[in-house]
Image: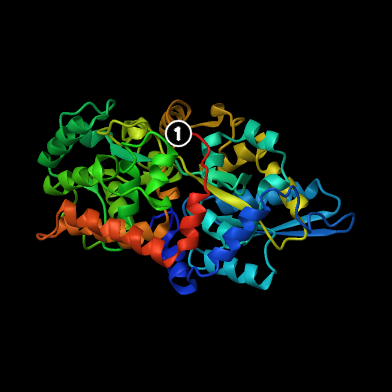
Amino acid sequence: MPDIENDSLRANHGATSRRGFLKLSGTAGVGAAAAALLASCSSSSASGGSSGSGPVNLLVWYWGEQEAPGMKSFMQKAVARYNSQQSRVKVTAVLQSSDSLYSACAAAAQAGKGPDIQYLWGGTQALGDVWLGYCAPLSDYIDQNWLTTNIPQAALAQTNWGGKQWGMPFYQIGTAFPYNKKMFQDAGLNPNDPPTTWDAFLTALSKLKKVGVSPIGAGFKDQYLGGWLASYFGQQNFNTVDDAIAPFKGGTQYSGPMYTEWVDRVQELVNGGFFNDDVQSINLYQGQNLFTAKKAAIVTSVQPQITSFYRSMGGADTVGVMRSPAFGTGKFANSFGAPAQVLLITKFSPYKEEAAAFLKFLHTPAMMQLMYQESGAICPDNNFDTAWFNTDTDKTMWHWQQTLPNFWYQYYYPLPFETNGVDPGLQQLWQSSGNVNAAVTTMRGAINKWSQQTPAQQNAYKNWKPLGI
């Protein structure tokens, strides 16, 4: 299981340091950078593409050990394998900490010196740095046909902007609910048939509560639970990615069932007493730990962590996996979120072509198999061989990914919507004076504040034409 506590990740895919960095750095530079990027998107090349025939020392800053234990071992072995095949290129990979990942990236970009390849969390948490002008378009150095042939479109869509592909999907974090099968059986539920509809979900939670366990283990003290709940439930009345980002483009109000029904559903969970009693006084990772402590039947989690649960808690006899139960009427009511963490080529790198070659190497079958063996993480690639899987939960989540829309809301909305709207808004639902209307008003206010304070980011959204998924 990832050492979330010690690395300050707080189980939110890195939002801890990303949030802190945004507070410190501000976003004033986004305007000119985004405008310049959009204007240059018609260019097919960039300066500093290759070093010619001289020696190349390629520097990679990466992350992932924290949520996929074994990623460090994988990267060390992958780099050694690649270097043994090269005559003039030497790759050095340095594992980054959660707290400094984004601030170090910004400092390197401003100094024009640092890594040639930079890891970032995916979606808008990577596009934010693209809009700041820190990255070079990946599709300027890797043929578009190779990208679309090898990488699933849903993985590309998360960092495709301005007609360019910016991020190379590195590994994915399929996001679902692991559940304890033995607790389901004790509650009179079918352990191999978890609920798929909202009504069935509420019935199951009521039965679990009666046997003396917390139906849902969670922690909201650090506020990070909000992004998970918004992404598990907030997309259910969307039919397209354009529906999801419309309120952030301006002109579409964040109101009505399409956007806010999910808040009513969270209120049902709160009113039903389906969370652990101390949900407001523990952090999110502590809530997740209730699963391994066998005090909660269901928790929020990501695929590498679910694999760890499976391997350490008795396998298929104990651990199952379920999707968000459906209540909405949109296409995304039955979807599966498998967002991709990404590697990007830095704008200042003099070795962009060599960087692109290494990124393609990480998508070779041998490297994809090695990543899964070492860390349990799955590389989002159409050539990934499912024969490598060794857990039932991985097989189930892969099936969902192949047959359902792949959408994770958190990687499409601007982060201030979560930090200033979703998190404090949802926390009100646990307060005696809180209600759905107040929560939604808080979320709407966060969007208005964000658009007023960072109009250039909103312009970037207006110019975003998402790929279909």
Residue drawn 39% across and 65% down?
A: 452
- Residue 253, position in %: x, y? 31, 49
Instruction: Identify which residue, 352 or 98, lies in the foreground.
Output: 352
**In the picture provided, is 265 more to the left or to the right than 289?**
left
Instruction: Identify which residue, 79 or 140, lies in the foreground.
Output: 140
Residue drawn 43% across and 41% down?
A: 242
> What residue occupies the far front of the structure in this picture?
251
Quadrant location of residue 149?
Answer: top right
**In the picture provided, is 254 more to the left or to the right than 358?**
left
Mark 1 crowdedness (10 Å alpha carbons): few <14, some 14-19, many ≥20: many
- Residue 264, position in %: x, y? 19, 45
Labels in figure, total? 1
Quadrant location of residue 171?
Answer: top right
Amino acid marked by disc 1? Asp
Q: Which residue is mark 1?
A: 394
- Residue 43, position in %: x, y? 72, 50
Residue drawn 59% across and 30% down?
A: 382
Q: Which element is circle 1 on?
A: helix
Residue drawn 39% across and 55% down?
A: 11
Asked if residue 140 is positioned above or below residue 133 in the image, the reply reads above
The reply to whether residue 163 is visible in this rendering is yes
Instruction: Identify which residue, 12 or 446, lies in the foreground.
Output: 446
- Residue 199, position in %: x, y? 17, 31
Asked if residue 454 is positioned above or below residue 306 in the image, the reply reads below
